[in-house]
Amino acid sequence: MQTVVTEKELYTQFAKLLEFPREDIRPIVEECIQELHESQYPEEAVKELLSFKNDLDRLSLDSLQELYSYTFELVSDTTLDMGYYLHAGQDGFKRAKNLVTIKAMYRENGFPFEEVAKGELPDHLSVLMQFLGFIDSEELRRDFMKTFVVVSMEKLHRNFQTKKNAYRHLINASYKIIDKDVKEEK
């Protein structure tokens, strides 16, 4: 019997993959691959996740953690702080206002930001994906994805096209899923 994976469940799983890698990353990747195989998402997303898994199989956890830190924390054009892509080159006040707005949205919807974020900013992609998996309002999810998430993901996705690293595949898969959900009429 085939189970239907909800986009909410998939967002929550992808959020875990976008956090600093721990020992449990490989089983989570396997679960996401299985969920994508049983879903309505594009085959390209499955292929990207399989490529990510293949790269993971060649890396020790220490090497993967080093790659994560370098890719997402030391290189600004591939940061997971998504507000950066909307406000790059502008004054910091616009981004700060955006962070406050996002955090207020989390609070208004009962999202346990402090617990989930583990020190990350409100616009960190793993936190955003957790929120997308948490909220029940389809209208709010779709609006937030259209006005903030997909716009910044397009820029992150574009920046990764010149990178030769395992996380390129995870970002590509994430982008394909979000892009499909934003463009799909419900």
Image (cartoon, grey):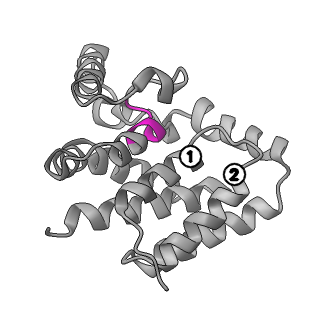
Q: Quadrant of the C terminus?
A: bottom left
Furthest residue toward bottom? 1
Q: Residue at x 58, y 37 (%)?
A: 72
Q: Residue at x 51, y 41 (%)?
A: 78
Question: What amino acid does circle 2 point to?
Answer: Ile
Percent position (x, y) of residue 56?
75, 59
Pointers 2 and 1 in contact (C-beta within 8 Å): yes
Q: Residue at x 62, y 41 (%)?
A: 71
Count residues near mark 1 (Cα–Cα under 10 Å), then give few for <14, some for 14-19, many for 20+.
some
Residue 157 in sight in this render: yes
Left or right of 23 in this view: 104: left
Residue that mark 2 sits on:
25
> Is label 1 in a helix, a strand or a loop?
helix
In the rendered structure, which disc, 2 or 1, sits on the residue that comes first in sequence?
1
- Magenta-drawn segment: 123-128
Residue that mark 1 sits on:
16
Number of numbered callouts drawn: 2
Q: Please say whether residue 94 is one of the residues in the magenta stretch.
A: no
